[in-house]
Image (cartoon, rainbow, N blue to C red):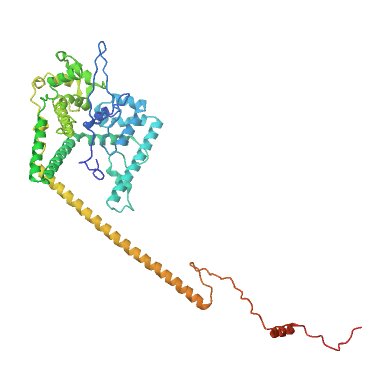
Amino acid sequence: MTSFLFDTNTDRVLSAGSDFKTYLRRMNLKCGWLLLLSISTGVWSVPIDRHEGNQEVKEEVQEESVDTGLYYDRYLREVIEVLETDPHFREKLQTANTEDIKNGRLSKELDLVSHHVRTRLDELKRQEVSRLRMLLKAKLDSTNTQSLQMDHASLLKQFEHLDPHNQNTFEAKDLELLISTATKDLENYDAERHEEFKRYEMLKEHERREYLKSLDQEKRDREEKRMQELKEKHRQHPKVNSPGSVAQLREVWEETDGLDPQEFNPKTFFKLHDTNEDGVLDEQELEALFTKELEKVYDPKNEEDDMMEMEEERLRMREHVMKNVDTNKDRLVSLEEFLKSTEKKEFNNPKEWETLDNKPVYTEEELQRFEAELRDKEEELKRRAETLRQEQELLKERGKALEAQRREYQQAVQEMSQRQKELQAVDGHPPAGPNGELQFQPETHKPQEAKAPAEHEAEVQSNLPAEPPQNLPSHT
């Protein structure tokens, strides 16, 4: 899994075993092989109702699937769903063994699927490439990396679940890479899950200590006493049977299956709890067997019981059974392996099971290193916060300067406009408008003053036509 975009300490990954076949078993479709079963905090047990004359096993159907935690989870699911629609590929998958899937031989069957399936796969790959490009851009933007000349083809090479050299069509190599990458990313899940739980417990203890430091002496003593009482109350639980022992399986046989414990039969028990009837017990089916034991120790209604610890306990139980029963290490328990495990001495006389409250998951030195890491991260966050505060102050100052400059420019423009109007008035030019256009004023006619009678008469006389000349020759 790439570390460029994803932090392996925080990503949650589905426990799917060391091969892709195990993963496919967890995805058990309605018709058979691809509906993802619930895990982690949502692990469920299989209730079985027995009726007289009817040995029908009723299986609870989990409608909602669980995200694997892989950053390409949706792409993986959609590719599998599309391939499952092709009858030829579906048949090949059902008959394929683990090695056929892991070594890539199954991917060669891609050339024989129908045209519309290949077209849909091509479309899914182009969508995935587009999504990865967006993730890359977002990552580069968040780190202030100059991406004007970003080479997407080179950057896509860090994603191992598809072929970056061919970004348009889904080929056999893409299926092979998808299978191998999912296998690799999932096979180390258990170790990562243990490490994640350890960090969770150390953080919880760190917060407890910091909380106590914040109290005065009297309140601190009272709170420490209360916490110690809760811890002791949690330890007061019935004996927990060793996972996979005859006592533990008989308890499931009696209380979950509703059968007579004196008639316990390992082969019948196996078939009852092989809920998908594929001939093996996968990790989900095994973990469902431990619910009754876990309920002895953990109750979500109790303040002293931590459900995260319950899931860690479930994981420890499953690992214990796998270590003793899964002889070929394929993380699947066959009927033969299961029956052989019942013949061992440990099956009838197991060691007492130690729960987490009696088994510390970290040392004081590890806690101190974790707290130092938290302090370093806190200091880094403070530095970033201070940098952001300074940048914010700088932006405010720049905003104020720009506002003052804007007001100065506005005042200068008004002064220039007023000066221009004054100059135009002196030169006799019509004044200009706000945009420089000329403004003409309508002419005003002054009323004429009344003239004196003598002046008026003289003016009239001067306007009379001259008398015609005398003694002009007469025309005949």
Q: Which residue is situated farthest in the bottom direction here?
A: 471
Q: Which residue is situated farthest in the front direction here?
A: 453
Q: Nearer the viewer, residue 38 or 337?
A: 38
Q: Is residue 194 left or right of residue 141?
A: left
Q: Nearer the viewer, residue 428 or 371?
A: 428
Image coordinates of residue 114 in percent, x first then y, are 39, 29
Quadrant the N terminus occupies: top left
Residue drawn at x 22%, y 53% as measured from the top left: 385
Figure check: 383 above or below 206 = below
Quarter of the rendering containing residue 92:
top left
Image coordinates of residue 83 in percent, x first then y, are 34, 30
Q: Nearer the viewer, residue 248 or 393?
A: 393
Figure check: 238 above or below 131 = above
Figure check: 369 above or below 242 = below
Quarter of the rendering containing residue 123:
top left
Image coordinates of residue 264 in percent, x first then y, are 16, 15
Q: Is residue 436 left or right of residue 83?
A: right
Image coordinates of residue 337 in percent, x first then y, are 17, 21
Q: Is residue 15 visible?
A: no
Q: Is residue 182 visible?
A: yes
Quadrant the C terminus occupies: bottom right
Q: Which residue is situated farthest in the top direction here?
A: 53
Residue drawn at x 42%, y 69% as measured from the top left: 413
